Amino acid sequence: MNPIENIWSYIEVKIRQRDSQPSSVSQLEQWVKEEWDAVPADYYRNLIKSMPRRIQAVIAAKGVNGIDDED
């Protein structure tokens, strides 16, 4: 539900697509910053536009992945 999770996933994919993997935590931090800055504005816009649909899905699922806790 939280759009930030989509952004982190996007960044993870971009880092994994690089020719090598980071050799240190500081290099990973740098790469994350680079990829964060490179996320296209349209990606953010599409996440924002998808929020009403996401909210309706949660409401339809009663907030628990479709499982009604009261049953």
Image (tube, rainbow, N blue to C red):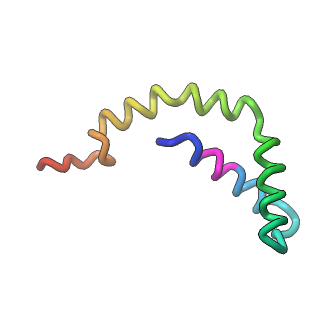
- Residue 32: x and y in percent read 77, 55
Viewer-nearest residue: 60 or 22: 22
In this picture, which residue range is highlighted in magenta?
6-10
Apparent side of residue 52 relative to residue 57 in the rendered image (left or right): right
Magenta span has 5? no
Measuring 79% from the left and 64% from the top, which residue is drawn there? Answer: 28
Indicate the quadrant where residue 21 lies. bottom right
Viewer-nearest residue: 10 or 26: 26
The residue lying furthest to the left in this view is 71
Measuring 82% from the left and 66% from the top, which residue is drawn there? Answer: 26
- Residue 19: x and y in percent read 88, 65
- Residue 44: x and y in percent read 67, 33
Apparent side of residue 18 relative to residue 10 in the rendered image (left or right): right
The residue lying furthest to the front in this view is 26
Measuring 63% from the left and 30% from the top, which residue is drawn there? Answer: 46
Viewer-nearest residue: 9 or 36: 36
Indicate the quadrant where residue 42 lies. top right
Apparent side of residue 69 relative to residue 54 in the rendered image (left or right): left
